[in-house]
Image: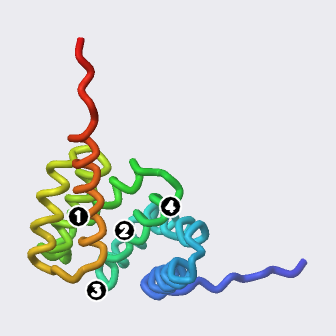
């Protein structure tokens, strides 16, 4: 009987390779496949620890949130945004943006507007901030134009 030995990559190299694979899949539009790898990483404390330790690791949960949003899984996307807020590597502008996303998806539109406006002050050219700022303004405008039902 012949034995097959599987060579295991050292932990850090393995985690890094998983991250690069998921990143590549994500950038190539294969978000379903990327999400499977993201979920695999999240379930392993060592792997997620390695990802958090690399400078680009902060983008991990952002990409994961994007994948969940594409699938309509808003609750899981909110969880990703909240995980991002735990990182000291997330700067003020991004922190405001993620808080805005959480508020928007939790239907706290006025809070979302305030967060996106503050994020916009930090970076007026950021297309994601501009898009979501416009989006929440439109939602508030629609909300204010809804006729009130008299009882």
Q: Pointers 4 and 1 in contact (CB under 8 A)?
A: no
x and y percentages locating residue 5 in the rendered image? 72, 83
Residue shown at the point (48%, 65%) measured from the top left: 67
Kindly indicate whether the residue at mark 4 contacts the one at mark 2 (C-beta within 8 angstroms).
no
Give the residue pinned by disc 3. 55
**Of label 2 and label 1, which has the lower sequence position?**
2
Number of on-image labels: 4
Pick whichever of labels 3 and 4 is earlier in the sequence: 3
Relative side of 118 to 23, left or right: left
Indicate which label's residue lies in the foreground, 2 or 4: 4
Residue occupied by mark 1:
133
Hey, which quadrant is residue 133 in on the image?
A: bottom left
Q: Nearer the viewer, mark 3 or mark 4?
A: 4
Cα gap from disc 1 to disc 3, whole angstroms? 28 Å
Classed neighbour count for the residue bearing mark 1: other residues with Cα under 10 Å, few (<14), some (14–19), many (≥20): many
Disc 3 crowd rating (10 Å Cα; few below 14, some 14-19, many 20+) is few
Q: Is 12 located above or below residue 66 in the figure?
A: below
Residue drawn 39% across the image and 48% down it: 75
Q: Which residue is mark 4?
A: 70
Q: Under tag 2, what secondary structure? A: helix
Report the residue marked by disc 2: 61
Whole-percent x and y of residue 120? Answer: 15, 73
Image height of 41 relative to 141, above or below: below
């Amino acid at each position: 009987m012949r034995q097959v030995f599987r060579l295991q990559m050292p932990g850090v190299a393995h985690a890094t390779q998983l991250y690069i694979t998921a990143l590549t899949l994500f950038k190539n539009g294969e978000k379903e496949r990327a999400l499977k790898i993201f979920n695999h990483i999240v379930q392993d404390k060592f792997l997620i620890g390695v990802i958090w330790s690399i400078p680009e690791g902060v983008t991990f949960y952002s990409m994961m949130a994007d994948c969940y949003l594409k699938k309509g899984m808003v609750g899981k996307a909110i969880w990703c945004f909240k995980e991002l807020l735990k990182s000291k590597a997330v700067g003020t502008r991004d922190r405001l943006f993620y808080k805005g996303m959480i508020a928007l998806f939790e239907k706290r539109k006025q809070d979302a507007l305030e967060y996106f406006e503050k994020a916009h002050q930090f970076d007026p050219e950021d297309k994601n901030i501009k898009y979501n700022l416009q989006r929440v303004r439109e939602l508030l405008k629609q909300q204010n134009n809804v006729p009130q039902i008299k009882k």
